[in-house]
Amino acid sequence: MADSTSRPPNAVPPSLARVAFHAMAAGLTPLIPVPFLDDYALRQVREQSVRDQLKERGLKAPDKAVAVLAGSYETRSLGGQLVSYLKAVALFPVRKVFRKVFFVLWVKDCVDLTSVCLHHGYLLHHALERGDLDAASLQGEAPRKVQAAIVAACAEMDSRPINQALRRLFRSSRVLMAEATRAFLDPKRGPRVPDPKAENAEVRSLTDRLLQELWEERGYFTALEAHYDKQLKTGLAATEPRAATGT
């Protein structure tokens, strides 16, 4: 990922720093103990990440396009909301019990969400740099095609190196450790009251540490870009009208 502005050869691009910050913020949403509120917070973070990237390029997309690029459009439909609701109702008692007992499950939630948002945010930046989205195409089907290529590219990658780095970071997270300890030692207390100042500082701290890890994995992200390029080309070719054969 490269910015057009000059910087030292080994410096982390500001664009990657912004993507990593939003990914880390998304990764902490499982700490919200209220059903559906954690999903709402995650959706807000992911959609804000999309809007920020578009804004950097002077672009403003319809809400539908933002939701598609953030991966939240289906869950905002009536059917998607119903499925999400039923799933949350079924899993909440299990998640509530096990999260209080097994810290590792909480870490896994945080790692999984951060990894997804990091990969998607990175590839959206790549797509915008390539010119796959502009003011006109954001009004049509391009966001859905770009999102489909992003999802397919991520599915082709072995994300274990990135997830291992994230796992190390979250296991040492002060906010995560404090919340797990509070839940274990005093389970009868009500939902925690988040401290925005402390958690913003924690997100920035985790982001800085994540960037140090990720900048050593530049080859991984170069390969990720190549998978996206291939998937988008394949998807576009599949939608092009076939020439008449005369038969």
Image: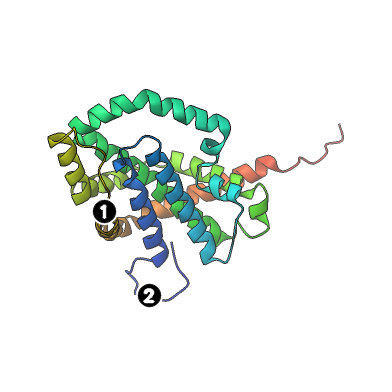
Residue 204: image location, x then y, percent: 29, 60
- Residue assigned mark 1: 195
Specify the quadrant of the image occupied by residue 212: bottom left
- Residue assigned mark 2: 7
Residue 153: image location, x then y, percent: 48, 44
Quadrant location of the N terminus? bottom left
Quadrant location of the C terminus? top right
Q: Horizontal placement of 171 versus 244: left or right?
A: left
Q: Horizontal placement of 209 versus 116: left or right?
A: left
Q: Amino acid at mark 1?
A: Asp
The residue lying furthest to the bottom in this view is: 6
| Foreground pick, 181 / 237 | 181
Q: Residue at x 60, y 44 (%)?
A: 144
- Tell me the crowding category of disc 1: few under 14, some 14 to 19, or many 20 or more residues within 10 angstroms, Cα based: few
Residue 26: image location, x then y, percent: 37, 48
The residue lying furthest to the top in this view is: 90
**Number of labelled discs?**
2
Q: Amino acid at mark 2?
A: Arg
Q: Residue at x 26, y 37 (%)?
A: 106
Judged by depth in the image, the label closer to the viewer, 1 or 2, is: 1
Residue 184: image location, x then y, percent: 15, 35
Which is nearer the N-term, disc 1 or disc 2?
A: 2
Disc 2 on helix, strand or loop? loop
Disc 1 on helix, strand or loop? loop
Specify the quadrant of the image occupied by residue 136: bottom right
